[in-house]
Amino acid sequence: MSEPSKPQGRKFQLPEHLKEYKGSWVIVEQERGSVHSVSWELVGEARKLADKLGVEVGAVVLGADSPELNAICGDAFTYGADVVYKVTDPVLADYRTDPYTRVMTDVVNTYKPEIVLLGATTLGRDLAGAIATTLATGLTADCTELDIYMDNRSLAATRPTFGGTLLCTIQTLAYRPQMATVRPRVMSMPDRDDSRSGRVVEVFPNLRETDVITKVLSFIADREQNEAHVAFADIIVAAGKGLGKPENLKLVFDLAKVLGGEVGVTRPLVQAGWTGFDRQVGQTGKTVRPKLYIAAGISGAIQHRVGMEKSDLILAINTDPNAPIFDFAHLGLVGDALTILPALTDAFGKRLSVNRLAG
């Protein structure tokens, strides 16, 4: 990472009592032994920050003690962690805000990390806000970039603001730890290195179920819900208001089906009721990083761009040759998406059929 541009104003000196805070931490999000991939993405990012600061990467794994939890601790090392804080108690078997917040507050106050990162998921956003409150520190949400100001060792957390029209970089100067959340797929997945190992610090908080007000009545896994999983698709065909009317979404679905991909949309289409929020890509929707992103009738406003610009290959289709999306798309087709989409569907369908027969 390159050194970010320096903020204006007087150079800040970290108070002496905060200099004992060391280390770049990630709170690993796991449910029933299944880890959300954003946690490993953040371990990779924490590794970059830690290397710049000359400190260790810590991964915090919370839950009821089990073979699955031990396996997660091992995985944390392979993705870049130096030390794993394994926090086990039967009360932590399922996520609940109160016990997780109490435990994490104690763990942070005991081991004093200077940076704490969480995924900007439903669980991560809930826990991050609660921990930042009990620790009385700052939290920068939905970051798109993280770096370090080396003159004062502060985390430079960049996020969109003013409805996504601007990017701002925020520092938490006079408080530790510095906290940030990052949405899934914003950071790249680090390479797995099975030769890595580290040390495990076991923490036993000794919680009591009777002290927790909320109770878990049942568990419904995401895979049992009938929702689109746009954030993790390798191929996405996305639609914007350039398609004209909701009936034309069928052209996007047809192409996505042939390619084996998912359908994404811009916020105006969701607001107009064309489809559900689970397909929205952009600052207020999902962040995606597919191998192929086909943008049909999308202008490329920054609110949408921040959610998909890290795709491996972006193909833009728009009637306006001056549309902003052509500034960052890898390939562009100037023309009517209502004509081009069916042609692509037909061409890809024929090509894939030939490949299947040849195979």
Image (cartoon, grey):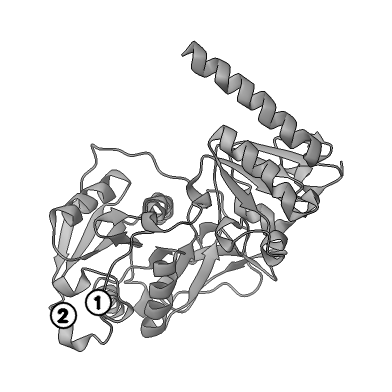
Q: Are marks 1 and 2 in contact (CB under 8 Å)?
A: yes
Q: Secondary structure at mark 2?
A: loop
Image x and y of residue 62, in percent: 24, 65
Of residue 119 and residue 140, the one placed in the foreground of this image is 119
Residue visible at 26% across and 79% down in the picture: 99
Residue 171 drawn at (x, y percent): 54, 71
Asked whether residue 187 appears in the rendered view, the answer is no
* Residue 163, quarter of picture: bottom right
Residue 248 pos. (x, y %): 74, 48
2 with respect to 43 (left or right):
right
Residue linked to disc 1 = 103
> Going by the image, does 318 lie left or right of 12?
right
Q: Can you identify the residue that label 2 sits on?
A: 207
Residue 22 locus on image (x, y percent): 33, 65
Q: Residue at x 48, y 74 (%)?
A: 139
Query: Which quarter of the figure has residue 210?
Result: bottom left
Secondary element at tag 1: helix
Residue type for callout 2: Leu
Badge nearest the viewer, 1 or 2: 2
